[in-house]
Image: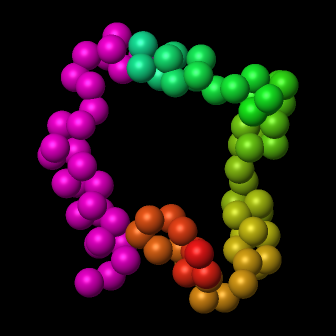
Amino acid sequence: MRMAELAQNYHNKLQEQNILPQNPQEHAADIEQALRNIPPQQRLDAPEQMPMNQQAFEAHVQSALKHVKNDTATGMDGCPYEL
């Protein structure tokens, strides 16, 4: 089975388990609560001005792909093999 199929099956099973709140207000409240619990020293000063908040263009993606090492894809858990 290909990696993409494994990921798709994993995410489909998560959605079938109904682990997300059904109520949009409850979901929004959960997000707000999580954001309030971020320690001040770990918060970004101006998140809207951070590079990760800028639009990604195809040239950016191509450049990033050219600079990564070969054979270094992460596993299903998002952790690199070396970990």
| Residue 44, placed above or below residue 17 | above
Residue range of the region highlighted in magenta in the rendering: 1-28
Q: Is residue 13 magenta?
A: yes
User: In which quadrant of the rendered image does the N terminus lie?
Assistant: bottom left
Q: Residue furthest left?
A: 16
Would residue 29 be found to the left or right of residue 69 on screen? left
Q: Is residue 47 visible?
A: no
Main SS, magenta region, reads helix
In the rendered view, tell whether residue 31 sits above or below residue 49: above
Query: Residue 55 appears at what percent x and percent y?
Result: 72, 43
Q: How is the image coloured?
A: rainbow
Q: Is residue 66 visible?
A: yes
Can you say whether 65 is above or below 16 in the image? below
Q: Quadrant of residue 36?
A: top right
Q: Is residue 70 left or right of residue 49?
A: left
- Tally of marks: 0
Observer-nearest residue: 31 or 56?
31
* Quarter containing the C terminus: bottom right
Q: Of residues 23 and 83, which is closer to you in this image? A: 83
Q: Residue 81 in the image: x percent, y percent?
A: 55, 81
For image coordinates 22% across by 23% down, the residue present is: 22
